[in-house]
Image (spheres, rainbow, N blue to C red):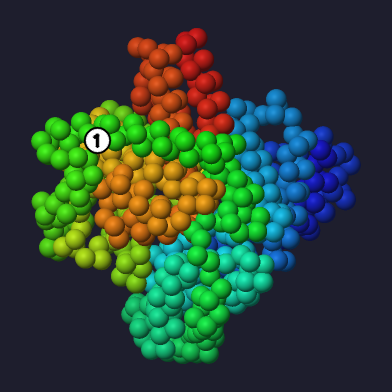
């Protein structure tokens, strides 16, 4: 590929500010290089990714994006994305991989995978799958739901102490511009849902009911109590008084005249039109183009060509295997009764619900961290510089939230945060807390995501890349490291680990069941209740999560099984030469990878290690 020809093509597709510079270089150059620089291509792709998702740039602590928001469900924006992905794929196709280092070869493979998959989703024949947030594609006609929804995610930026900076007057002006740009997104979402009604692509009524229940916090006319006024309400005294008055006035006007009316319009639409059009089915397989879209989402979330039928059977096999191990733990504890009775015992055990104050839950997680610290260096010699904290989930989203990890900023100024929802502390069950900490915090998401951001050998676009099958596969794999880290001495906590693993195995069954095999919401709930110890309320919330995020829940188990398979392969091949710390470095050292790329990397490492 001719370097400047395609850099100009990419610049044109992306609308980059450096387009003029590219054109000037072309006109003054007397000799045209044979190949585009892979570093310049990586940099162009990184800039493109930041341009289409400036919210994640803010999450990473990057300057210059805090006032921007992209309406990624708008047709014109998506056409621009398709053109950009096409330009990058053209550039990639002419690069000779034999001229690249091994690290750059892997990075170009990730970039190509990402471009092809995103372009395919945007060109989905009926239900276009838009640019993702949380690595979760958004179906255009279904842009809003009760959990994986941009309008909910956006609220996490609305208060002091989160990713959005609120230290200066400029910071507040940036937030004002960003909120103002969010209003067209809301309007586009409503228009797309209305078109979805025409096309027969509508959410289930059970989900719409939950969405309606969440609207009060957004339609609330009392500005002082509104979620989008929180940062203004909590403004620092360091903001000068005259600026403070202007900021307050600006936001009061924006919320009163634009944002709240947009939400009120959406609320009216949901209540008076959309709910009546809602489906009684649970999965997207029954919708127009649903089966094709689900197969695409399976590929997207697993980075494999596995079929829904294969996933369904794999899930049933894993459920049976884990149940057998659960039986052994039940016998060790000495519980008399069958496994289902033991599930009920664990769900309702007062011993496992000992807390009376939410801070006790946070303290328990910090104590788990302290217990494992002496053993971390036995498994890891590569650890992040980024600080880490455990916090309670914000009150406005706590009722429907799951425990989660939010990565810190790249420069370490904002810590990685493990958020724990505690809506009713007296009902908080601790039996799986050790496994939960391993997964969401250390060495799960905090290690993997922080090390990825801090790895200066990776191209910039890989610092924030979050390929779910790798990210969640790693986190689920780390749950199995508990005994090696000095945890799981309490059989209830080990049972908690098995419960979390069977929960991910159940996901394979119910996700494919609802979206490919016509299972109802009630069938999925019943299957889960029979095979895990979670509460009924928690299971219902989870099933409804899978209903609106087809395929996303598959990534955990598929990724975990592959990483465990690769560790076993390396242990057998290397014998006494196997070093668990080096293996973990190999898995964590190249950023978020499709499974096929990760497997090839581990196989090369095994081969090289055997020759040494």
Q: Quadrant of the N terminus?
A: top right
> Measured from the top left, where is residue 188 in percent x and y?
62, 73
Q: Is residue 353 left or right of residue 480?
A: left
Residue shown at 45%/67% (left/top)?
207
Residue shown at 24%/35% (left/top)?
326
**Residue nearest the observer in this picture, 185 or 376:** 185
Residue shown at 76%/49% (left/top)?
87
> Measured from the top left, where is residue 238 in percent x and y?
36, 78
Determine whether the residue tagged by mark 1 lies in a helix, strand or loop.
Answer: helix
Which class describes the residues within 10 Å of circle 1: few (<14), some (14-19), or many (20+)?
many
Can the viewer see residue 243 in this picture? Answer: no
Residue shown at 10%/51% (left/top)?
351
Can the viewer see residue 476 in this picture? Answer: yes
Say above or below: 579 vs 216. above
**Residue nearest the observer in this picture, 112 or 468:** 468
**Residue nearest the observer in this picture, 210 or 443:** 210
The residue identified by callout 1 is 326
> Measured from the top left, where is residue 70 in percent x and y?
61, 66
Say above or below: 188 vs 511. below
> Measured from the top left, where is residue 202 in percent x and y?
57, 67
Say above or below: 382 vs 400. above
């Amino acid at each position: 590929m001719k370097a400047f020809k395609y850099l100009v093509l990419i610049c044109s597709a992306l609308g980059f500010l450096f387009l003029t510079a590219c054109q000037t270089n072309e006109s003054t150059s007397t000799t045209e290089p044979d190949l585009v620089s892979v570093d310049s291509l990586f940099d162009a792709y990184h800039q493109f990714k930041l341009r289409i998702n400036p919210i994640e740039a803010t999450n990473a602590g990057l300057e210059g994006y805090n006032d921007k928001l992209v309406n990624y469900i708008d047709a014109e924006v998506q056409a621009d994305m398709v053109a950009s992905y096409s330009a990058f794929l053209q550039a990639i196709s002419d690069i000779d991989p034999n001229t690249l280092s091994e690290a750059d070869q892997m990075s170009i493979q990730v970039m190509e995978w990402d471009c092809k998959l995103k372009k395919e989703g945007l060109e989905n024949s009926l239900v276009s799958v838009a640019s993702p947030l949380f690595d979760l594609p958004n179906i255009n006609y279904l842009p809003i739901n009760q959990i994986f929804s941009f309008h909910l995610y956006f609220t996490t930026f609305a208060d002091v102490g989160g990713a959005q900076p609120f230290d200066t007057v400029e910071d507040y002006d940036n937030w004002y511009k960003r909120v103002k740009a969010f209003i067209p997104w809301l309007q586009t979402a409503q228009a797309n849902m209305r078109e979805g009604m025409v096309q027969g692509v509508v959410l289930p009524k059970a989900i719409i009911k939950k969405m309606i229940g969440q609207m009060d916090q957004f339609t609330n006319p009392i500005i002082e109590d509104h979620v989008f006024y929180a940062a203004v309400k909590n403004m620092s005294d360091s903001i000068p008084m005259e600026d403070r008055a202007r900021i307050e006035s600006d936001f009061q006007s924006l919320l009163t005249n634009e944002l709240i009316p947009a939400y009120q319009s959406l609320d009216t639409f949901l209540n008076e039109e959309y709910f009546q059009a809602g489906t009684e089915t649970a999965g997207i397989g029954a919708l127009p183009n649903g089966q094709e879209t689900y197969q695409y989402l399976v590929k997207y979330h697993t980075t494999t060509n596995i079929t829904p039928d294969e996933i369904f059977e794999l899930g049933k096999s894993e459920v049976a295997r884990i149940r057998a191990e659960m039986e052994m733990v039940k016998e060790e504890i000495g519980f008399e009764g069958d496994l289902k009775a033991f599930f009920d015992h664990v769900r309702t055990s007062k011993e496992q619900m000992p807390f009376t104050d939410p801070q006790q839950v946070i303290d328990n997680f910090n104590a788990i961290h302290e217990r494992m610290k002496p053993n971390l260096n036995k498994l890891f010699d590569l650890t992040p510089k980024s600080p880490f904290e455990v916090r309670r989930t914000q009150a406005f989203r706590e009722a429907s939230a799951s425990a989660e990890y939010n990565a810190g900023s790249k420069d370490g100024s904002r810590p990685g945060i493990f958020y724990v929802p505690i809506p009713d502390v007296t009902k908080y069950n601790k039996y799986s807390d050790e496994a939960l900490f391993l997964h969401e915090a250390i060495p799960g998401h905090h290690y993997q995501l922080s090390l990825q951001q801090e790895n200066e050998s990776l191209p910039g676009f890989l610092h924030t890349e979050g390929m779910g099958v790798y990210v969640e596969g790693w986190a689920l794999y780390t749950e199995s490291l508990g005994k090696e880290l000095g945890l799981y001495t309490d059989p209830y906590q080990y049972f908690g680990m098995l419960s979390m693993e069977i929960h991910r195995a159940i996901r394979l069954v119910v996700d494919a069941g609802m979206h490919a095999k016509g299972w109802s919401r009630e069938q999925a709930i019943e299957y889960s209740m029979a095979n895990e110890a979670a509460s009924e309320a928690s299971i219902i919330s989870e099933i409804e999560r899978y209903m609106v995020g087809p395929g996303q829940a598959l990534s955990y188990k598929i990724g975990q099984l592959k990483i465990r398979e690769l560790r076993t392969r390396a242990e057998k091949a290397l014998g006494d030469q196997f070093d668990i710390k080096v293996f973990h470095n190999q898995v964590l050292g190249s950023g978020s990878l499709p499974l096929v790329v990760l497997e090839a990397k581990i196989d090369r490492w095994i081969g090289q290690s055997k020759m040494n």
